[in-house]
Amino acid sequence: MAAFLYDRLVTDHEYVQRVRQQRPSALLPVIAAASARWHSDTWWNSPYRKYTPWALADVARTSLACGNEYRGDGSCTENDLMAMLAAYATLTDPLIRHNGSAESVASWLLRTSGEQFTYQESGFNDLARTAALFGQTTPANTLTCLVDGWAEQLFGCSLSDYVGVTQLLQVAALRNEGRFDPAWLGQPQMEQICSIIPARTIRDVTERHFVIDLKTFKTENEKGRLSRDPDLRRFEYNPLRGRPFLSGFGAGYLAPSSHLIIPKGSPLGLYYMGIAHFGSDFARELGDLFEQYVGRQLRQLADAEVYPEIIYRDERRSVDWIVVFDDLVLLVEVKSTRPPQQLRLGVLDRTSAALRQIKHAYKQLETTAALITDRDPSFRHIPADRPVHGLVVTMEPFHTANAPFQKEMQPDTDIPVTVCSATELEHLVTLSDMSVSQLLRQRQEDPLASTYSLNAVLVGKNLGRNAILDAGWDSYPWKRHAERASQTTVDQ
């Protein structure tokens, strides 16, 4: 098949009709096998780079939502799938309708980053952070929700076993063309696995948290749509994110997008489960834990002093953390927020709760910087003789937050401010070939680099191991029992 099947733009209607030519029962296993074959970032080496995880996930979603078991002859080949992926790669976009205006370009950047970058997060960081955050971080305030037994109430097992099941399902899908069959647990070669996590726990957690049937999928897919614009359909919420395995497509369960399994064990995956079960208290207490977790990461900096928030006049509070280097004062404000679905659709919504939180962070940074400069008595121990930078740390990435079109939505500040995710911070604190303060100052002096994500300036730098993440990872069953279950690992 030619590298570019289409030499023109393809409408969403034409794309959907192409997907509908194959029956879901024939197409979904082909997608699942392709997703398992081009796992992690190996899709860069796939034919014509068409087997992107986001394209495969949408072809699966489209087939599930719109497919028909009475069409076609029941066959599906790799060439059929390639034709669908080629159509997906040339889908039209609202950017075309709006003639490339500045606002439409900004919206396109939001959509594209939300579509693609979410599939390229580090599975190791995400899973290791779950244990490090929920199990190994001491809260600053009294908890009422995340108390002893919360994990058993939410998952039906311990946090460690839940993540262990997530890892097991990932490996099973990658090695079995996207499939996991609970019946395998009764086979002799699975005895060692089931001696670490009982077969009943694996079955129960899988069925309760990872599996969706076709009828439920259709309902959730329709309910989750925020727009009826056909050009935005592919950017809508995919129910496979909530439950990546399908029932009713052959023996056991089928994962059309193996990239969506690991995120179920990440803090973001737990966030949505926790909110659904415990309500807003879960979000509030997670925010408290995340703030302390950021402090733990910052304290790994060997050449800096780290101070917690300062309470000053009338019980007001400074930023969450102040990091003092010999040549820089870094003010850190923590926000346990995530991009809303509207942002993933490219809606520049200045009123969204997430963007309001970031806006408030900017104001906190500016206020604290002024208090230091003005030598407020509560801040006398913070030096005022060196540059001050601000860092807003979010739990989930806002991939274009430092770009000019996003910056202009935030308040003007007298200090440089960078927005970074938890993953970026986890990498930043392991920098070994130069000081973090030097890197941040150099980045700010570069007009172009300062508009990119923090990860961009870490490319090519020497990064060490993150001891906090390693401790989180080591707490999981397969790491603790590596000699008995060496096959259950996730690529780091």
Image (tube, grey):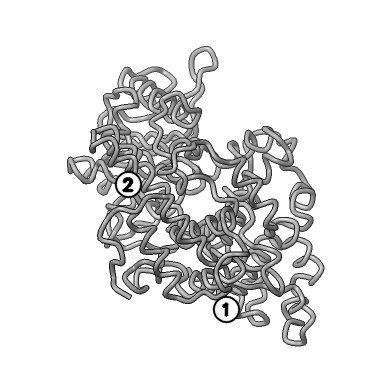
Q: Residues within 10 Å of mark 2 (few under 14, many from 20)?
A: many
Q: Position of residue 74 (x, y in %)?
A: 58, 73
In the rendered structure, which amino acid carries the disc numbered 1?
Arg
Q: Taking 230 as reference, is 433 left or right?
A: left
Instruction: Check residue 200 in the rendering and tell me which mark sits there, or answer none.
Output: none
Q: Quadrant of the N terminus?
A: bottom left
Residue drawn 34% across the image and 56% down it: 431
Q: Is residue 368 visible?
A: yes
Helix, strand or loop at mark 1: helix
Q: Position of residue 7 (x, y in %)?
A: 25, 60
Q: Taking 352 as reference, is 324 left or right?
A: left
Q: Position of residue 459 (x, y in %)?
A: 29, 59
Residue drawn 76% across the image and 47% down it: 150
Q: Which residue is mark 1?
A: 175
Vertical side of 237 occupied by 476: above or below: below
Q: Taking 180 as reference, is 325 left or right?
A: left
In the rendered structure, which amino acid carries the disc numbered 2?
Ser
